[in-house]
Image (tube, rainbow, N blue to C red):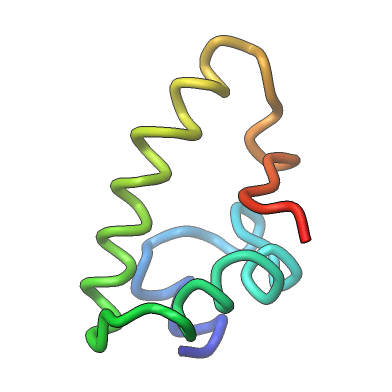
Amino acid sequence: MMYSEFVEMSGKSESYISLTEYTEEIEPIYMNCDIPNKQEFIELFKDVFKKIVYPISNRGQVNIHSFRMFEH
């Protein structure tokens, strides 16, 4: 899935998820998962993000835009 597809299908803006964030964090997960449908992957990603990142961010413990999902 291309970055532009992800941005359009997720409803997020390019200022919300940068190309770098997509390339380094999201695309590798998508390429290595068994979910063949792009929209299904995006919905699952949004659900996981909502359950994990937002609660942490809302507590003021992390800036949501500097949150790294995985350390390489």
Image quarter in which the C terminus is found: bottom right
Asked whether, in this view, residue 24 is left or right of residue 10, the answer is right
On screen, residue 50 above or below 61: below
Q: Quadrant of residue 42?
A: bottom left
On screen, residue 33 above or below 20: below
Name the spot of residue 53 as percent of width and height, x first: 50, 34
Q: Quadrant of residue 41?
A: bottom left
Q: Quadrant of residue 62?
A: top right
Q: Residue at x 34, y 74 (%)?
A: 9
Name the spot of residue 58 as percent of width and height, x first: 52, 16
Q: Residue at x 66, y 56 (%)?
A: 15
Q: Residue at x 53, y 83 (%)?
A: 4
Asked whether, in this view, residue 33 is left or right of residue 54, the answer is left
Closer to us: 16 or 44: 44
Asked whether, in this view, residue 30 is left or right of residue 59, the answer is left
Q: Residue at x 66, y 53 (%)?
A: 70
How many dots with numbers? 0
Name the spot of residue 16 as percent of width and height, x first: 60, 52
Looking at the image, the residue that sits furthest to the top is 59
